[in-house]
Amino acid sequence: MGTTSSPDCLIPGGLRSVGVAMFIAAASALYAPTALSAQDAGTIKPGQSEADVKAAWGNPITERKSGIYTYMFYENGCLKTCGTYDVVILENDQVVDAIVRAGNHKYDGVSSSPSDRKPGPTNVKPGTT
């Protein structure tokens, strides 16, 4: 009988089982925000901080900063039909606007792009373009 140098033989069930369990746990953590999307994520309000938004809606899928502005992007389940993620806009770490399309996200302020707004042409005077 030969011996093997594989560490799998040293632990009952092998390290592969531990590795698979760790992978599943890590993958579950990555997809947790998507699982939350079916639940009510809470309401954000003007004046709240970035930390308040994350406490209500979780971590954004991405975040961009430009000067005093922060743009937090959230999944909404209608990217192809809505044309945008849900976006929270902060100025100096205070919510100033939000574009919300997901049913589980709520904004208790006046949005610059309300969900019931229908797309249409802008009123442009002929010859001014």
Image (cartoon, rainbow, N blue to C red):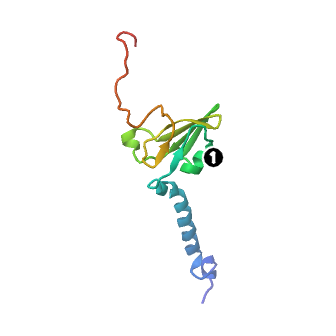
Identify which residue, 53 or 63, lies in the foreground.
Answer: 53
Q: Which residue occupies the extreme front position in the image? A: 108
Position of the N terminus, as image quadrant, is bottom right
Rendered location of residue 87, percent (x, y): 51, 39
Q: Quadrant of the C terminus?
A: top left
Quarter of the image where one finds residue 20: bottom right
- Front-lying residue, 4 or 47: 47
* Lateral position of residue 18 relative to residue 120, left or right: right
Q: Position of residue 3 (x, y in %)?
A: 63, 84
Secondary structure at badge 1 equals helix
Along the horizontal axis of the image, is 71 left or right of 124? right
The residue to which callout 1 is attached is 51
Above or below — where is 19 with respect to 90? below
Q: Residue at x 57, y 37 (%)?
A: 46
Q: Nearer the viewer, residue 97 or 19?
A: 97
Residue projecting furthest to the top: 127
Q: Quarter of the image holding residue 49?
A: top right
Q: Amino acid at mark 1?
A: Ala
Image location (x, y in percent) of residue 81: 36, 41
Q: Is residue 73 visible?
A: yes
- Whether residue 6 is visible, yes or no, is no
Identify which residue is drawn at 56% across, 73% down.
16
